[in-house]
Image (tube, rainbow, N blue to C red):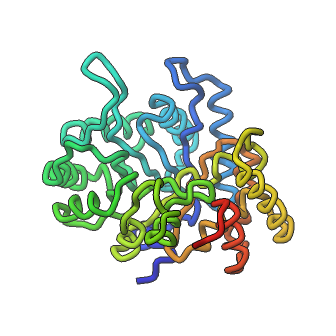
Amino acid sequence: MNPSFVLQRALPTSSRLVFGCMGLGGSWDAQPIGADELRHAAAAVDAALEIGITLFDHADIYTLGKAEQVFGRLLKQDPTLRERLLLQSKCGIRFADANGPKRYDLSREYILASVDGILQRLGTEYLDVLLLHRPDPLMDAEEIAEAWHQLKASGKVRHLGVSNMHSGQMALLQQALPEPLVANQLEMSLLKHDWIENGTCFNDDQGKGGRVWSDTLQYCQRHGIQLQAWGALARGWYSGAAPQDAPAAVHATATLVQQLAAQHNVAAESLLLAWLLRHPAGIQPVIGTAHPGRIGACGAALQVKLSREEWYRLYVTARGLELP
């Protein structure tokens, strides 16, 4: 199986980069969408399309639903836009309300209701991909499969994936599903590199203290599940936004990123994405910024061919410690 771009098989027009829409729609409150928010969203989407992005990633909670709403307005303004892109959204996170605290809900009823809300806000008849946003400790694989059968049969969702799940959770869910999961979206970047540490330091004390990945990376590779990396731009810490009190390794890495970016004649953002793209797992970076300029700065990522030595220089500098 060629892992270079797994989701291509399910979504032939999908791009190697994904635009994350969390920054659209304005503030995380009940403030209505205005003309400024609409213009901002239009500029961000145009910038993403300009660099070849065709897959747009949403979640029903982003700016409390306003990210999907403002995107839906763009689709309404230009009916041809829906034909030129792929829509992905997530469900399963519920904020605190009169019924309970912040919680995860992958019950059949909540999944079905969430998809209806997503489609209504986006103003579209179907999603190309639905991701289950967070693993619900009370999730019942058979119940999720029932919801999936109904969504698939109704034409509301074409493909199913997950987000923030480890290999055991995916395996449990997959055994109840008639079709393969197509994606798993996880936090992966040069800054949050424990997904690498889990492999390089699994038998060494340096590997302790990070999140336990087990064989999640390898499970996705073996089963053709597209790895999507949220937080791919490392919070902007390596491209000019690092706080002064950040660890020394952060500042050293930021300097190295700038040096290598200049050598490759690209922006720092493109170099950071190129580091992810260099991994043989075929990672699909999600661009989280909604700033048109920074989106454009990601456009050369596919043109950068990091050497093995450059890749390791970035990794070792970011970890701040020589490999065991």
Which of 308/92 is in front?
308
Task: Residue 110: name its quadrant.
Answer: top left
Measuring 69% from the left and 56% from the top, which residue is drawn there?
Answer: 50
Measuring 68% from the left and 26% from the top, which residue is drawn there?
Answer: 36
Q: Is residue 82 above or below residue 216?
A: above
User: Quarter of the image containing the C terminus?
Assistant: bottom right
Q: Is residue 85 above or below residue 42?
A: below
Task: Residue 254: name its quadrant.
Answer: bottom right
Q: Position of residue 121 (x, y in %)?
A: 42, 34
Q: Position of residue 225 (x, y in %)?
A: 38, 68
Question: Does residue 216 appear to the left or right of 280 in the view shown?
Answer: left
Outermost residue to the front: 205
Q: Position of residue 304 (x, y in %)?
A: 73, 72
Measuring 71% from the left and 71% from the top, which residue is drawn there?
Answer: 313
Which of 93/124 is in front?
93
Q: Is residue 182 above or below residue 211?
A: below
Measuring 51% from the left and 30% from the top, which residue is drawn there?
Answer: 63
Which of 255/230 is in front?
255
